[in-house]
Image (cartoon, rainbow, N blue to C red):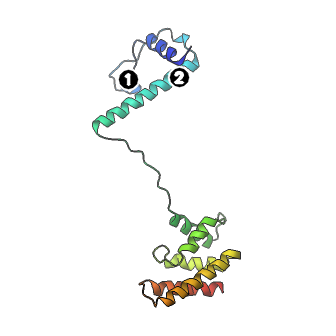
Amino acid sequence: MEFSEAILRYLTICSYIRTEKDIEEGRMEVPVKQEEEELTAEEKRKIERKLKKERKKKEKQLLNEAGALVEKVKPQQSSAKDLALKYLMRWSKKHKDWRFQKTRQTWLLKHMYDCDKMSDKHFTALLNYLDGLKGNAREVTIQKAEALMEDLETTDGSTEDSPAKIERIRQVLQILS
């Protein structure tokens, strides 16, 4: 027996279709089912799913007609900044749940001189983190810090955040050299 045949059969067996909501609110009576024994458990499940889908569709139509569109709330995802700073603070507290994450370290190394993205509190923790930096990451960080220092010295401090940025670069070079 096909699914559509089972639905038609069920609908003819039931005198009329009722939704649970209508029954609860007393607008309709509980349907009287006759010859229900003829439907298998799988046929019943299929019919229930189909009716549930139709009920949801009707509810959505009613909401749309009333002008209240249902918007699904998306869980707010943490930004790369938030994740990187949480990573750094977890490291600074030496929690046993800390583990190395290359993407977080990359974000920290890329934005460590930006006072808007990294507060002084976080920068202090980052200096301690940089003390343990090893390998190529250490070498590249030193090279970038030296290159930034040269660039800022040649521009004669024409940008407004230069003093803070220069100080941060000096601190990084002191730690790593």
Q: Which mark is residue 46?
A: 2
Q: Which residue is drawn at 67% across and 79% down?
A: 139
Q: Which residue appears at 29% of the width and 35% of the height?
A: 65
Q: Any mark on residue 123, and which?
A: none
Q: Where is residue 24 in the image (x, y as percent from the top left)?
A: 38, 26
Looking at the picture, tell me which residue is in the foreground, 174 or 97: 174
At 66% from the left and 66% from the top, the residue drawn is: 100
Q: Earlier in the sequence, mark 2 or mark 1?
A: 1
- Between the C-alphas of marks 2 and 1, the distance is 21 Å
| In the depicted structure, whether residue 22 falls above or below residue 140 | above
Secondary structure beneath label 1: helix
Q: Which residue lies furthest to the left in this view?
A: 66
Q: Position of residue 97 (x, y in %)?
A: 65, 63
Q: Residue 23 carries which label?
A: 1
- Asked whether 161 or 77 is in front, the reply is 161
- Residue positioned 50% across, 17% down in the render: 4
Q: What residue type is labelled 2?
A: Lys
Q: Residues within 10 Å of mark 2 (few under 14, many from 20)?
A: some
Q: Could you tell me residue 42's position as x and y percent?
A: 58, 20
- Using the rendered view, name the quadrant where residue 21 is placed: top left
Please say if the residues under marks 2 and 1 sit with CB atoms less than 8 Å apart. Answer: no
Could you tell whether 139 is left or right of 69 in the image?
right
Q: Residues within 10 Å of mark 1 (few under 14, many from 20)?
A: few
Give the residue type at disc 1.
Ile
Q: In this view, does 15 lie to the left or right of 99?
A: left
4 shown above or below 79: above
